[in-house]
Image (tube, rainbow, N blue to C red):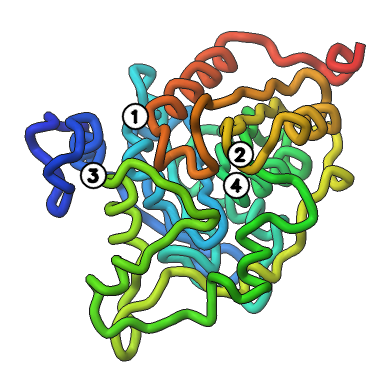
Amino acid sequence: MPQPVSGRDPAPGTPPDAPAWFRAALAAQPETGAVEVDGAAVAFRAWGPPGEGVLLIHGGAAHARWWDHLGPLLVGPEGRRVVAMDLSGHGDSGRRERYTLQQWAAEALAVAAAAGLAPLPVILGHSMGGMVALIAAQEFGNRLGGAVAIDTPVREMPPEDEAARQRRAFGPLRVYAERERAIRHFRTVPPQEGEPYVLAHIAEHSLRAVEGGWSWKFDPRVFLRNALTPEDLDIPGCRVALFRAEHGLMPKHMGELVSDRLGRGVPVVEIPAAAHHVMIDSPIALVTGLRTLLADWRHSRAATPGEVHA
């Protein structure tokens, strides 16, 4: 079982100017594993003892290591199990001919079981990962303790998809002869500033070795998936919460619209001063909000659909 260590013992490669909490989080080495789901290996990383906990899902073209600095913090004093997965077509997972939100939701349930999460895990998804969490809440809600969508734009085409289809980003994948040069070209979509030590860590782990050098760890075809619109949403089979960044991709009116479609018992929590990639520019605020929500869900009673609409 991985154990947090002192901030004086940073993991190899951790930027020396990173704060102690970040260095300690990266030094808490996770367990790693994979499970085969419909012919593709789906990789995951896990912190904390097996049992009650959460599953973290990244956004489009991202990967599980976007959560490396937050996973150990979410373990918290409760000692919850925290699992971060690579959706197929991302990170260290296998690729498919076709990707759908429904397929990824099925992968999430399979990873939760294989990675030692107790029955009724909570799924936390950022951006496109939040779409997967919302689909899972509707299709597998009776097998979940809850679902949280973090700055998830519910509309015809999120910016990552639009950038990919307009060929402004995400492919065809470029091969860089030098790894350091590739890291220098790392950019988020949409672009934003953030804590430099977080960006450096994510960029470093966004590459894989290929013939001729280095390239990014995602399949450009992931952006050919189906969309998620407000009309696709219905009352979920489990608790749901929405987190929105103050300067992100889910404006206040969108959060209210999605909450109304899911039932008025769905809270919308704003992370102040944050942009879309909340784990990059406001990691501690995000963890604080999530730990507060999870503590409440652990001790409070979920409203029934009848109570929600009363």
The image's mark for residue 29 is: 3
Q: What is the distance, in whole Å, between disc 4 and disc 2 at their CAs?
A: 6 Å
User: Earlier along the polypeptide chain: callout 1 or callout 4?
Assistant: 1
CB contact under 8 Å: marks 2 and 3: no
Q: Residues within 10 Å of mark 2 (few under 14, many from 20)?
A: many
Gap between marks 2 and 3 measured at Cα: 28 Å
Amino acid at the residue labelled 2: Asp
Disc 1 secondary structure class: helix
Residue at x 47%, y 80% (from the top left corner): 173
Which image quadrant is residue 88 in? Answer: bottom right
Q: Residue at x 43, y 42 (%)?
A: 83
Q: Are marks 4 and 2 in contact (CB under 8 Å)?
A: yes
Point 69% across, 45% down: residue: 153
Looking at the rendered structure, which numbered label has been put on residue 73? Answer: 1
Q: Residue at x 23, y 71 (%)?
A: 180
Q: Are marks 1 and 2 in contact (CB under 8 Å)?
A: no
Residue labelled with disc 4: 127
28 or 206: nearer the viewer: 206
Q: Please determine whether, in this image, residue 141 is positioned above or below residue 298.
A: below
User: Helix, strand or loop at disc 2?
Assistant: loop
Q: Is residue 100 above or below residue 301?
A: below
Looking at the rendering, which quadrant does residue 198 occupy? top left
Q: CA gap, disc 1 to disc 2?
A: 20 Å
User: Mark 2 — residue?
Assistant: 151
Which amino acid does the dot numbered 3 rest on? Gln
The spot of residue 281 in percent (x, y) is 41, 38
- Label 3 sits on a secondary structure element that is loop
